[in-house]
Image (spheres, rainbow, N blue to C red):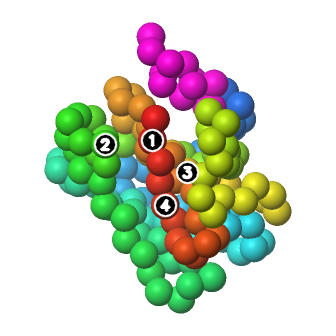
């Protein structure tokens, strides 16, 4: 087991109870800590995972697209994935994430496929949008 999987397992264990979307579905969660839930919709196909985010901060909807391809950093290894809500972590491996702010009930998201390191998503307060990182 490599360090990435160990850190991922630790993050999931610390996150406490998580809830997930169905294969194609939506959830509402406060990503930026403003006390209002953002709407996140997940659409999955054999080649792409698309997240549509409607935030209360920026009126414009945001779309994030991830591939299904083990060779790419911006992709999951297989579909379908689960989108889980987790406690926000702003300094993985002691390196702060740009624009990340813990507090006020803000949550993070992870895309989990059960094979690759999950894609971690958080609200970037500097750019007012959802962004991601991965080990």
Q: Earlier in the sequence, mark 3 or mark 1?
A: 3
Q: Secondary structure at mark 4?
A: strand
Alpha carbon of mark 1 to alpha carbon of mark 2: how far? 8 Å
Which quadrant does the N terminus fall into?
A: top left
User: Is the residue 105 above or below the residue 84 in the image?
Assistant: below
Q: Residues within 10 Å of mark 4 (few under 14, many from 20)?
A: some
Alpha carbon of mark 4 to alpha carbon of mark 1: how far? 11 Å
Q: Which residue is mark 1?
A: 134
Farthest residue to the right: give it: 104
Q: Secondary structure at mark 3?
A: strand
Residue 7 highlighted magenta (yes or no): yes
For the record, the magenta segment spans 1-12
Q: Earlier in the sequence, mark 2 or mark 4?
A: 2
Q: Earlier in the sequence, mark 3 or mark 2?
A: 2
Q: Which residue is mark 4?
A: 131
Q: Earlier in the sequence, mark 3 or mark 4?
A: 3
- Give the camera-side residue of 42 and 126: 126
Residue at 54%, 61% in the rendered image = 27
């Amino acid at each position: 087991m490599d360090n990435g999987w160990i850190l991922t397992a630790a993050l999931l264990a610390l996150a406490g109870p998580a809830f997930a979307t169905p294969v194609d579905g939506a959830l509402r969660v406060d990503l930026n800590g403003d006390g209002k839930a953002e709407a996140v919709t997940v659409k999955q196909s054999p080649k792409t995972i698309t997240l549509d985010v409607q935030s209360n901060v920026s009126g414009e909807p945001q779309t994030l697209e991830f591939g299904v391809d083990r060779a790419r950093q911006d992709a999951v290894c297989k579909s379908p994935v689960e989108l889980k809500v987790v406690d926000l972590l702003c300094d993985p491996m002691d390196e702060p994430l740009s624009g990340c702010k813990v507090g006020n009930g803000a949550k993070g998201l992870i895309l989990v496929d059960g094979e690759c390191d999950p894609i971690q998503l958080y609200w970037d307060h500097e750019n007012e949008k959802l962004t991601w990182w991965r080990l």
